[in-house]
Amino acid sequence: MKNPKVLVVGGGLAGCEAALYLARHGVSVVLAEVKRIKANPSQKSKSFAELVCTNSLKSKDPNSSHGILKHEMKGLGSLVLEVGLKTSVPAGDALAVDREAFSAQITQVMEATKGIEVIDVEVSDPMAFAKKHGCHFTIIASGPLTTSPLENWLAENIAKEDFYFYDAIAPVVDADSLDYSKLYFKDRHKPVPEEEGLEADYLNAPMTEEQYYTFIEALVESEKVPAQKFEDYKFFESCLPVDIMAERGKETARFSCMKPIGLELPDGTLPYACVQLRKENLIGSAFNLVGFQTRLKYSEQVRVFKTIPGFEKASFLHLGSVHRNTFLNSAKALNWDFSSKKFPELFFAGQITGVEGYTESASIGLYVASQVLRKIHGHEAYIWPVDTGIGALVNYVMTAKKPSPSNINFGLLPKVELTKDERRDRKNRKKVKKTKASAAARESFDKILPNIIPLHESVSSRV
């Protein structure tokens, strides 16, 4: 194709990955983003690739499911991964970032890259917009917070049935407003650093049995934000609001985001429950309440969360919220390369396809961009093997009997075979399974990489 040009709608993680991948391969890109002229309620900055929920890009462990994705993203020249490593903050085995620095650097790359034209505009009809700007293909990476005009177009032309679920954001607290005499630094299952001046990555607020049950009761009785209009709340199970956990049972949170296991107090005893805090930035001026997504009204969040030990005078820099997320029934509306069955030149990437999570969304942006590039070079779509991380995600989205967004997890990958001795070793069996599945995924990806990138082109990893 002579002088190929692609429209990318959305400057989130998936959109930025897709735009840069194509630009690095000589394709002209129009990146359309609306947030600088019309932000949604969950957006707080003008930067691209804003992390509206947690600041964690999940595990760096190569033998974890997210480690598998990171290996594949690196092989495809991921901008999100590179900038994430450059702007990381201490978070144990997780890749957590200074969210402002992270988004600022990605925005800088988008605006400085030759071949990417950034337009601040609301796209309501992607087909008409693409035609107006001379684009041959379109990638919609508008994310879970797609604007109403575009959502209406999608509902009319792509998905005739409802496509949404609800997500929640955890609050962020000012570090200087906490009472550290009631808190302690410790990473789960790890000893406290002995070297003077060093401290663990996580700050913890321990609770006694009485404090825990009083807190759970307050969560249950607090006022919540109601669902919009006539909709019912449909939450992603792996990212439930802490108040819903409380409603499901008094012990639910204690076996989830508030579990004390591995978080012994300085005297060696184990608290009954624990609230973990993770740094929001390198200087440690703010902390994110890990797993504390919530539906509570703002005033109720301040009242209830101030009952956490050490939070009596807490000042919240950012309170939690719920928002309606949009996603497609991809198995019904899309082909395996995530192109529309109705409009072959229209593709979808990121969370709108039915994946959940930052690295998942970014990796699907790379996957779709690679498929578009194949079409530009006259190649057929390339379907990834299911034993790769991205291949497993795509397979899940395209085969799930009922649309339900999913993170990457080992349950999506093929079953690994264990030897008789490995099966008998109950203590290490789970770890061995993950190690084998991860090794198989890396080997499979490395083998197919020449097929993913047309004409054996190399991908630059420079920002």
Image (cartoon, grey):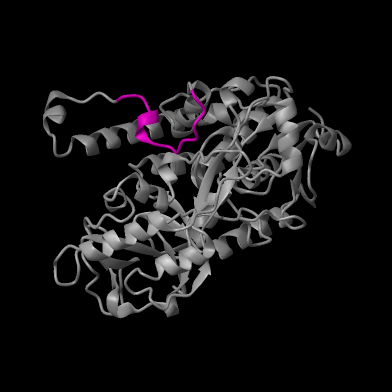
Residue 362 in view of the camera? yes
Q: Is residue 89 magenta?
A: no
Q: Position of residue 388 (x, y in %)?
A: 43, 30
Q: Position of residue 417 (x, y in %)?
A: 25, 23
Residue at the spot 67% in from the left edge and 53% down from the top edge: 40
Note whether 250 is above or below 190 in the view shown. Answer: above
Q: Is residue 405 magenta?
A: yes
Give the main secondary structure, helix, strand or loop, of the magenta stretch. loop
Note whether 140 is above or below 12 in the view shown. Answer: above
Seen from the viewer's position, the closer of residues 199 and 43 is: 43
Q: Quadrant of residue 177?
A: bottom left
Residue 280 in view of the camera? no
Seen from the viewer's position, the closer of residues 24 and 17 is: 17
Q: Position of residue 414 (x, y in %)?
A: 36, 24
Q: Position of residue 162 (x, y in %)?
A: 62, 30
Residue at the spot 41% in from the left edge and 66% down from the top edge: 305
In the figure, is residue 217 to the left or right of 77?
left
**Quick one: quadrant of the C terminus?**
bottom right
Q: Quadrant of residue 310?
A: bottom left
In the figure, is residue 394 to the left or right of 141?
left
**Quick one: quadrant of the N terminus?**
top right
Note whether 409 is above or below 48 in the view shown. Answer: above
Residue at the spot 34% in from the left edge and 36% down from the top edge: 438
Residue at the spot 51% in from the left edge and 62% down from the top edge: 87
Residue that sits furthest to the right in the current view: 132
The boundaries of the magenta stretch are 402-415
Q: Quadrant of residue 421?
A: top left
Total numbered labels placed on residues in the image: 0
